[in-house]
Image: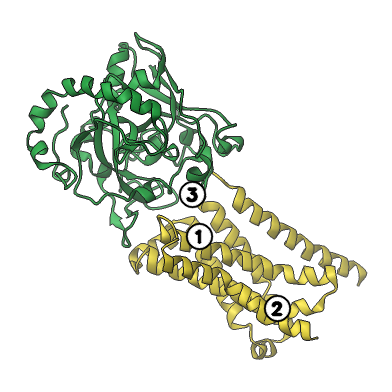
Chain colours: A yellow, B green
Amino acid sequence: MRASRLIKPLVFVAAMGPLAYLSLGAWQGRLGANPIETITRSTGLWTLRFMLITLAVTPLRRLTGWNGVVSLRRMLGLFAFFYGSLHLLTYVWLDQFFDWAAIVKDVAKRPFITAGFSAYVLLVPLAITSTAGMIRRLGGRTWRRLHRLAYVTAALGVVHYWWLVKADIRPPRNYAIVLGVLLFARVYVFARSRRQA
Amino acid sequence: MVIRRAPDLRSSEITDEKLYLRRREFMKTAAVPAVAAWAGLAPALALASGQDALPNVRKSVVTLDDALTPWADVTTYNNFYEFGTDKSDPARNAKHFRTKPWTVRIDGLVNKPGDYHFEDLVAPHALEERVYRLRCVEAWSMVIPWVGIPLKDVLKRVEPQGGAKFVEFTTLHDPKQMPGQRIGVLDWPYVEGLRLDEALHPLSILAVGLYGKVLPNQNGAPIRLVVPWKYGFKSIKSIVGIRLAAKQPVSSWQASAPQEYGFYSNVNPDVDHPRWSQARERRIGEFLKRKTLMFNGYADQVAGLYAGMDLKKFY
């Protein structure tokens, strides 16, 4: 019991790690020749990672029987939203410097930005409805259905990454494989439970 | 030397003003320092390790007002996929790259084909500093003081034949030394090409150094192309082959994604990469993006090469 109460703050501190690392790097001027690119990349990658970690919670619980892990899911999902917000802010502020005309053009014209922007827009309702009150108001069934969007937004995140690389597709491919495995686990459990019903 | 002075090619503090004012006289006598330079160059090159100074480098005849990109950035932020696809990879993975001995095979439609040792290739020419903008296709840019020799002088020495219309360059293929070549990210070896008149343009150089020092491995040692009005990937690194050809070569990036990378790949703010805009660029070290200039700011010198061509079609 005490262990599970301790784990949440520990995970919280760990999840702040990438931001702390970036901030320290920026402070010490260690972010390389193109710091804005480094910040954009890092926040983007951590958004995708937290999305996948969040999606791994339920399969992990099934696999290990460790129910306590579910209590971390909301926080992990909110960290995906948090890093996604930083990623978007980096793009709007540091990269484009509030050049709204250029931003609108980018979102409309560049498929990889369209995908990334859509992924973020879909994260917003998930973050808003993450409170206990909202779950109650929506009802468990509707809430669960809504939160299946997490798969859509993660898929859009992978596509966003895939479409921006020039030639080396190995990193986005690895994320796609992880997402595929998680999705398969979900579908597999769903199909089996229906057969048993 | 027929480099006309453009409004945006001005003398800067790195050019000695007296020398700059005497530049015409200076260029007339260029043949003399060329010989003198070599006398001191050979032993220095033999001893050279990564950051040794190059002797007898003529001050820049082509320069810019733009601030130079610091050495640390120029040598740690590199696209050189032979040593890894992350920009920090080449500085790390090219540390022990062997650039001596080095031979460049020059063949195809030339009267004097052959395997030229690096020293023999460079020796007859005076080393000259050229401060150029480098614009990457990824929309970032640098200002680099290269040290090199005009490509046209090398080509003239090997005597291109009448039928030669293009020049094809090849990078070393050595997966043992170049870990990136063990991965099929591109079709190795890396190949690039120029039209012969582009190659003979006075702005096109073969660089063997930067900041007055021997070219670091991660920047394409020991010898690389620099064509400042084209996207960076055209400036092929660690060259082992130069072939004069009648037919237009297919460059590595063209082969990899023909709808995204054309043969010409001239810097052009009006022709976007299919996936991102080329209208602006981030100069390394600057916060706000700047407008990308037509032909990377060298329009006055090179636009004539493309007179009457539809640059949207020949991108």
Considering the image in quadrants, where does the C terminus of chain B appear? top left
A83, above or below B307, in the image? below
Residue at the top extreme, as displayed: B111
Please tell me whether mark 2 sits on a helix, a strand or a loop. Answer: helix
A79, above or below B99, in the image? below
* Residue at (61% x, 35% y) in the render: B182
Residue bearing the label numbered 3 = B88
Badge 2: chain ID:
A
Left or right relative to A186: residue B89: left
Quarter assignment of residue B207: top left
Badge 1: chain ID:
A
Residue A172: percent from left, percent from top: 60, 53
> Can the viewer see residue B89 in this picture?
yes
> Can the viewer see residue B308 in this picture?
no
Left or right relative to B110: residue A15: right
* Residue at (69% x, 54% y) in the render: A177
* Residue at (56% x, 68% y) in the render: A18
Label 3 near label 1: C-beta < 8 Å?
no
Residue bearing the label numbered 2 = A72
Check chain identity for marks 1 and 2: say if they share one.
yes
- Circle 1 Cα neighbour tier, 10 Å, few/some/many (<14 / 14–19 / ≥20): some
Residue bearing the label numbered 1 = A41
Query: What whole-number distance in Å separates the C-alpha atoms at marks 2 and 3?
Result: 35 Å
What amino acid type should be assigned to the residue bearing mark 2?
Answer: Leu
Quarter assignment of residue A26: bottom left
Residue B73: percent from left, percent from top: 38, 50
Query: What whole-number distance in Å separates the C-alpha atoms at marks 1 and 3?
Result: 14 Å
Q: Nearer the viewer, mark 2 or mark 3?
A: 3
Quarter assignment of residue B303: top left
Label 2 near label 1: C-beta < 8 Å?
no
